[in-house]
Image: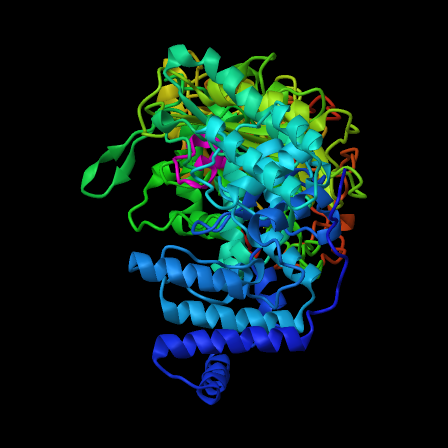
Amino acid sequence: MRRNPIPSTNRPVSFRGQFFGGMLIVLLGAFLLGCLGSAAAVGAYVYVARQLPPAEELLVRSKTFESTRIYDRNGLLLWEIMDPSGGRRTVVPLNKVPLVVREATIATEDPTFYSNPGVNPLSIARAFWQNYREGQITSGASTITQQVVKNTFLSAEVTYTRKVKEAVLATEVSRRYSKDEILEIYLNQTYYGNMAYGIGTAAEVYFQKDVAQLTLAEGTMIVGMAQGPALYDPYTNLARAKIRQGIVLDLMVRRGYLSRSEADAAKAETLSFSPPAITMKAPHFSVYVREQLEAQYGRELLYRSGMRVTTTLDLPLQEKAEAIVKARLELLKEGDATNAAVLVMDPSSGQILAMVGSADFYDESIDGQVNVTMRPRQPGSSIKPVTYLAAFERGWTAATMIMDITTEFPDGANPPYVPKNHDNQEHGPVLVRGALARSLNIPAVKALQYVTLPAFLEMAHRLGITTLTRPDYGLALTLGGGDVTLMEMTTVYAELANGGRRVTPQPILRIVDSANRVLFEAPKQAGAQLIDERYAYIISSILSDNSARAPTFGVQNSLVLSRPAAAKTGTTDDYRDAWTIGYTPPSVDKSSPGVVTGVWVGNSDGRKMKAVFGSRGAAPIWHDVMEAALKDKPVVEFQQPPHMTTVEICPVSGKLRTDKCPAGHKEVFVSGTEPTAPCDVHVDVAICSVSGGRATQYCPTNVLRYQYFEVYPPEYRTWAEQHGIPQPPLEECGIHTRAPLVELSLPRDGDYVLDVVDVRGSARLDDFDHYEVQYGIGDSPIGWGVINWQPVAVENGLLHQWDTRTLLNGMYSLRVVVFDRHGNSAMSPAIRVIVDNPEPTATPTPTRTTTATPTPTWTLTPTPTRTLWVTVTPEPTVTATRTPWPTLTPWPSPTRTAVPTLPAATPSPEPTVTPVPTNTEVPPEPTPTATLEPPAPEPGPTVRT
């Protein structure tokens, strides 16, 4: 039964009692200093008091020592950050401390606490005598108030001077603060062992409970540790701790706070202690946050201000990720993979949801405390999207064709760089979509060669990669030849998921101090537009296209989730690093933010693994973590931005598909970049059957043979032929090399002719056989007669001498037709001439009968139905009739624009002629008796085909 409860008071002890106590201290101080007399004692007191900090600072100073606590986004404690030179501390108000704990403290430390003026004169006198007898300070005789002053204001030196300062300050503190305030400060700053400062922290450390829930046995066990935390440590010496607990209980009985039966019951109680180890959850993340806080606020504020830090971490997801890493690494033991790291972020805000820096933070054999998410490693092919983004900005599309064949790239004075694909195979023509989705190396190097290294580095820096700083990078950079961090690479992929907007990793949501004042509130990230959102969408489209990556990864692979997701693997050449990074898209309204996860697998010391690819080592971890993070979240599709166009293309050339192409597929383009030309790989090529070469424009149509080919640029011809892909002839036809030259230069169109006329011009044709000079009646003959046939080509020379004297005067048409050895022909445009021979003058001879000139045999040559080189639009058909000379209207010519009607000729005797059978097609030729030379026509233009 409680006999002597603690007095309830919030008033300072009366000044009168404090004054006499202070005077006693001064007297003692005067004695120590050899100064006798009350005046000197008072003077010494005042002097010492002026040299000390103001007592009013007690509350301020006492509250500056409080541990910083880090919580996950749901309020779950991750870590309490302790001052390396101090410990953990949680401040609790006095009314939350159980009464038995307060009574035990007073009974043990300062029985006269509520009545003394901050010091106990009798205890001081006793301690002075003991110290004098021992020749050194062995007894302190400090009250609770003095202990508060010592811990708050003074150093730990053990001298008489410090003791005097302590007594003076204790007196001043008692004048300004109530006993309850002083007791609260004491209980919150006393060290109870195992890095526990304050009664609240001690309750958590030893019994894992709130201080208000402490029992009598638990409370007295803790109070007993205050005078010797190491000596009475229950973890190292429970028996001694129990003895000390019994002493505390006995003191409480002696002071009237407990009955004997209550004390004995508490002594008999068996106590259960929690493990003493101070652990932290999500250790790599917690340390990462501490580093951020220390950099921002400094060590003093971090370790003593009692900050409450709410982070972005999702502890349940973190613990699942840690478990997944350990389980998957067990399956990779045969591949000699001992470590892994995982980083999970919200791509919309950059908030870090999980961070596994290593498989085991406490395993020194794998350098467990090294946070691999922050350590530069080679990323393998996971960096290829950066290359293709730079290529998109320079005109490439997802349908750009690249030849995936072994290629030597010059490397200055070094041997040529010859990259190989992961399967050591060539795949021929591939489009960018397939090249990236299948992670082909040779096309990626060609893309970087096209982009150039400076452009690649500019893109990488723009996206937030800061670790690529060496001056000697080569084309292998696109295959992961430079060191980057998992944090940086995961951020790049977050920016792709975020439509090309900047993402800044965010570990902290909110910070408040011990007074609940807000020190920091995470801003909402708007994010600058780093790349065109349409390019980001195309990359997402490629990395989420399982059919495009199936030839390499198979249809069933770890990159396939239960929802649309974009992902890319990476593996270094020597299997030192295996990566997988991927993401799901956020919803348009951001109600579902999406998730991005980066995974690294390897060995912290850089040892090689045994054929552990990114797809085998990192991808299964990525798959499981993503499914855990997305559980119960709505499925979101990748949303195509505006101003994009979908076109069906040839899967080989990337151009518009034709009926000659294999089955095509639809590709998405930034509007304006889609192909407009048809496929030029799958084509019919015209071959000249005579020469076997490519047909030229001069090859006749009846010697053309159209043959299907899969045509590749000349530099890839050898590769195609070696892989059984026939290529068209390189040489053009060597026979039909010139355009036919078929023309009449004289006479000219519209000329008047008579007598024997030189027909001049050209008759030349590749593979020449012969030419014919033909004529017909009228300006649109219905038939043609051959007046000359020659087997020798003529170029700008005499084709024939045409005797017009056997023809009736009138209009005729002339042309030259040339033939090759295959029956192909070409003809000149017909010219029209007017035969204008003079009428013959007959001389009567009674005894002679004039015999008519035999009529020549005419061969009617129909107009060819097909002309290869020259197309002549026929004139309207006109029926050829004999027109009397006086009424003939000739064809206009440059030299004669009009022909007047001639006057009637003077009648003269006509010779007797032998009648010639009437021929409606060919007029009989009169027998000339005289030649009338008309004026020579002026030269006219040559008519050519």
Q: Residue at x 69, y 55 (%)?
A: 526
With respect to residue 316, does 560 lie above or below? above
Coordinates of residue 275 in the picture (x, y in percent): 53, 28
Res 182 seen here: yes
Q: Residue at x 66, y 56 (%)?
A: 184
Which of the 4 quarters of the picture holds residue 361?
top left
Which of the 4 quarters of the picture holds residue 162?
bottom left
Indicate the quadrant containing the C terminus: top left, top right, bottom left or bottom right: top right
Q: Count the labels in the image.
A: 0
With respect to residue 194, does 765 lie above or below? above
Coordinates of residue 73 in the picture (x, y in percent): 69, 41
Res 276 seen here: no
With respect to residue 150, does 192 lie above or below? above
Please tell me whether residue 865 belongs to the stretch shown in magenta: no
Indicate the quadrant containing the N terminus: top left, top right, bottom left or bottom right: top right
Which of the 4 quarters of the picture holds residue 793?
top left
Q: Residue furthest bottom?
A: 39
Q: Residue at x 58, y 15 (%)?
A: 557
Coordinates of residue 696 in the picture (x, y in percent): 48, 30
Coordinates of residue 492 in the picture (x, y in percent): 55, 43
Q: What range is drawn magenta here?
A: 371-384
Q: Which of these two is toward me, 391 or 742?
A: 391
